[in-house]
Image: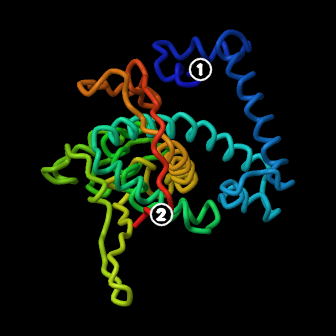
Amino acid sequence: MLSYSRFHAIFPIVWKACRFFNVGSEKRLKDSIQTLQEFAKDKIKSIKQNSITEIEENSTMSRLIKNGRYDEKLVIDMLISFVLAGQDTSSSALTWFFWLVHRNNQVEQEILKEINKNRIKKQCVVDELKGMTYTHAALSETMRLYPPVAVDLKQAATNDILPDGTKVKKGMIVGCFTHAMGRSEKIWGKDWPEFKPERWLREEKDNTTGETKRSFVARDSSAYPVFLTGPRMCLGKDMAFLQMKSVVSAVLGRFKVVPTAGDGFDPVYVAETTAKMQGGFPVRVEERVRVEPSEVN
């Protein structure tokens, strides 16, 4: 919020003066940045020493560091970006996910089937999470309706022309309204208000086994800019999905998440730096009856 407050400053000269004299909010920001940089250095050291989780082992960041050919400052900046962009955004997406799943029992049952099937397969954690196709679709559908970042703003570094011919001059602010785009009938059809993970799936019949298999069908990032688009595409997208599916599997596999406010609860979407549910999401956690492997179809 310290850096974000610069954006709302009525008189930018104030925060610039604070930065020059290293006082007030700018001093706190400088100290916070130093703390983050130390954290990033310790994380890089852990990756080099292999003291990381299986999910982290398969991340783009880990492969880059272990390759040995990298600029340390660049990697530190990238790692801090992952931390800042991934922590609050993932928790925001999961908050809305658990609420939507509670309201849609059929979706919850499909996710549970997927979790239970994966539980009896002898796969590594990453492969298991990557195979959670329906959960991936449900998370994507959640972020369509309630994107963690409601609007993304960029400032033009030079004069440019957009594909539709719109001229953008150096210094102009260009905004991508992700929340509005996810609710556009033109992009998503007349059923856009519905929570339908199926809109992200394609079903195909296996001619050998006769089974119907689902595959995830990604949308063009220009129509679904939740993770941005083009050269600005979020580097942590795959990692974010793995982390969120890991949480979903761990929580829904054992517990049912029930809003304490009751069935009439209608949360308010608050579009701050990272979108939030106004007042938070108080829930009651109920332990599920365990399903034995033999009971899973």
In the displayed structure image, the side of residue 236 where residue 286 appears, left or right = left
Task: Give the CA distance from mark 1 to mark 2.
Answer: 45 Å
Residue 158 on image: x %, y %: 47, 46
Residue plotted at (43% across, 59% down): 114
Q: Which label number is shown at residue 128?
A: none
Judge whether residue 191 can be spotted in this image.
yes
Amino acid at the residue labelled 1: Leu
Q: Circle 1 sits in a helix, a strand or a loop, which is it? A: loop
Q: Nearer the viewer, residue 245 or 69?
A: 245
Q: Nearer the viewer, residue 241 or 119?
A: 119
Amino acid at the residue labelled 2: Lys
Residue plotted at (82% across, 51% down): 51
* Crowd tier of the residue under label 2, counting other residues whose Cα lies within 10 Å: few below 14, some 14–19, many 20 or above: some
Q: Nearer the viewer, residue 166 or 93?
A: 93
* Tags 1 and 2 touching, CB below 8 Å: no
In the displayed structure image, the side of residue 65 where residue 170 appears, left or right = left
